[in-house]
């Protein structure tokens, strides 16, 4: 089912949580609302669920305006950050409680509970109580409780934030597998970019009550539309260098200090410009060693600090003038702090932003 927010504004007195926001989620799509605390992502989800009144604008589900409809009448199911399980009920009773209250026939309840238990691998736990389950198992029960409702839209409000790292990875797989098998429209709120990149068909990066960029994970990662998006997506974060774009012999270059990066291979959004700009390049897109000499720009840096990260190492490297770049290198590459290393930058793999507006050039 299609979900739409049309010119939605949510205000609390003088504070505006969402401002004239428009968003369309196509049927069967998995959309992730991504952003830091206070950006408005949970407010938008709650407005879609009917848990938050909108100040102005409309919420549509399919061909119905549900702006003022009760949550139970919207055809949605919601998974919250807290498990919110009934402690004295078994897993089976937790899964079936909402259906029993709704007066669903016993045979139908048993069929739905069995299907949810099989999908979420809860079959051996149906007679246990929540206190006898791990955190990951409890969250699976919470997901199962909404799965039995046969909803057309699933809403997830940071369901994995209370779990440890290993459980988050396992539950991410469960949620992705669940979405693939059901084909229902899913809207997922998180501040974790890894969750967003691994789960989403599309990501809406939010900032101060508005959508900064909407696109596929690849688009968001490779062509961030603003410096804010570029800085938020990627771990470790994108490197930034402040400088200016100049025209040299009719061709654009990016200059910072005494360093020059030719921009012949950079794809400008609307033609080359001149003026203050910020160059962004991800640590994994920097080239080092002899191969660096074949890039659009290369220079000798000094290794300032090393951060082993298991599969690779993050090397923080400095130019004599003081600029620092983070560089990913293989773990097996032996280097020490103080070593010299040649680093190259390709304009093709870089992003350039207007310093004043933060928008991609």
Image: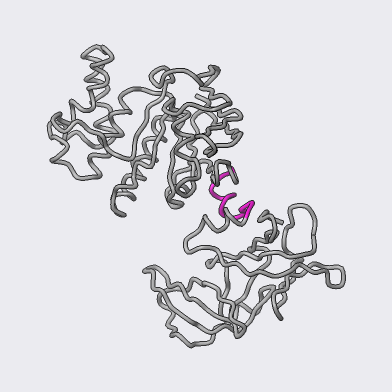
Residue at (53, 68) in percent of width and height: 283
Q: Where's residue 206, x and y in %?
A: 54, 45
Q: How is the image coloured?
A: one colour
Bounds of the magenta segment: 214-226
Q: Where's residue 27, x and y in %?
A: 51, 28
Q: In the depicted view, which residue is nearer to us: 299 or 120?
A: 299
Q: Where's residue 70, x and y in %?
A: 42, 18
Count of labels shown?
0
Residue at (32, 49) in percent of width and height: 168
Note whether 270 is above or below 78 in the view shown: below
Q: In the depicted view, which residue is nearer to us: 157 or 328?
A: 157
Decide if residue 180 is on the left or right side of residue 240. left
Decide if residue 68 is on the left or right side of residue 116. right
Note whether 348 is above or below 18 in the view shown: below
Residue 121 highlighted magenta (yes or no): no
Decide if residue 292 is on the left or right side of residue 185. right
Decide if residue 41 is on the left or right side of residue 270. left
> Residue extending furthest right?
249
> Residue extending furthest front?
14
Instruction: Answer with the quarter of the image where residue 347 lies.
Output: bottom right
Residue at (70, 59) in percent of width and height: 354
Q: In the depicted view, which residue is nearer to us: 323 or 108?
A: 323
Instruction: Answer with the quarter of the image where residue 264 lies.
Output: bottom right
Image quadrant where one finds the C terminus: bottom right
Q: Where's residue 103, x and y in %?
A: 26, 12
Residue 217 highlighted magenta (yes or no): yes
């Amino acid at each position: 089912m299609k979900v739409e927010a049309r010119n939605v504004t949510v205000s609390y007195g003088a504070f505006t949580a969402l401002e004239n926001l428009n968003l369309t989620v196509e049927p069967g799509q998995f959309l992730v609302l991504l952003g830091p605390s206070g950006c408005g992502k949970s407010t938008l989800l709650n407005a879609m669920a009917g848990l938050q009144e909108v100040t102005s604008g409309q919420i549509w589900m399919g061909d119905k305006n549900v702006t003022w409809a009760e949550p139970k009448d919207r055809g949605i199911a919601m998974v919250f950050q807290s498990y919110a399980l009934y402690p004295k009920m078994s897993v089976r009773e937790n899964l079936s409680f909402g259906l029993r209250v709704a007066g669903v026939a016993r045979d139908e309840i048993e069929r739905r509970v069995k299907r949810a238990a099989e999908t979420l691998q809860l079959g051996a736990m149906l007679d246990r109580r929540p206190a006898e389950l791990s955190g990951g198992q409890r969250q699976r029960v919470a997901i199962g409780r909404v799965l039995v409702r046969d909803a057309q839209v699933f809403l997830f409000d940071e369901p994995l934030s209370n779990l440890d790292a290993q459980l988050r990875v396992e539950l991410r797989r469960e949620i992705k597998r669940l979405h693939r098998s059901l084909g229902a429209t899913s809207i997922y709120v998180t501040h974790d970019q890894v969750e967003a990149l691994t789960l989403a068909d599309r990501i809406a990066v939010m900032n101060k009550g508005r959508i900064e960029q909407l696109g596929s994970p690849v688009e968001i990662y490779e062509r961030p539309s603003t410096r804010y998006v570029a800085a938020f997506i990627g771990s470790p974060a994108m490197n930034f260098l402040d400088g200016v774009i100049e025209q040299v012999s009719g061709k654009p270059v990016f200059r910072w200090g005494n360093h020059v990066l030719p921009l012949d291979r950079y794809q400008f959004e609307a033609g080359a410009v001149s003026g203050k700009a910020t160059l962004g390049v991800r640590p994994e897109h920097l080239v080092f060693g002899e191969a660096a000499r074949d890039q659009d720009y290369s220079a000798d840096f000094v290794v300032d600090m090393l951060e082993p990260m298991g599969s690779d190492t993050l090397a923080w490297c400095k130019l004599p003038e003081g600029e620092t770049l983070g560089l990913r290198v293989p773990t097996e590459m032996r280097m020490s702090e103080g070593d010299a290393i040649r680093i190259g930058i390709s304009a093709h793999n870089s992003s350039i932003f207007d310093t004043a507006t933060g928008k991609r050039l």
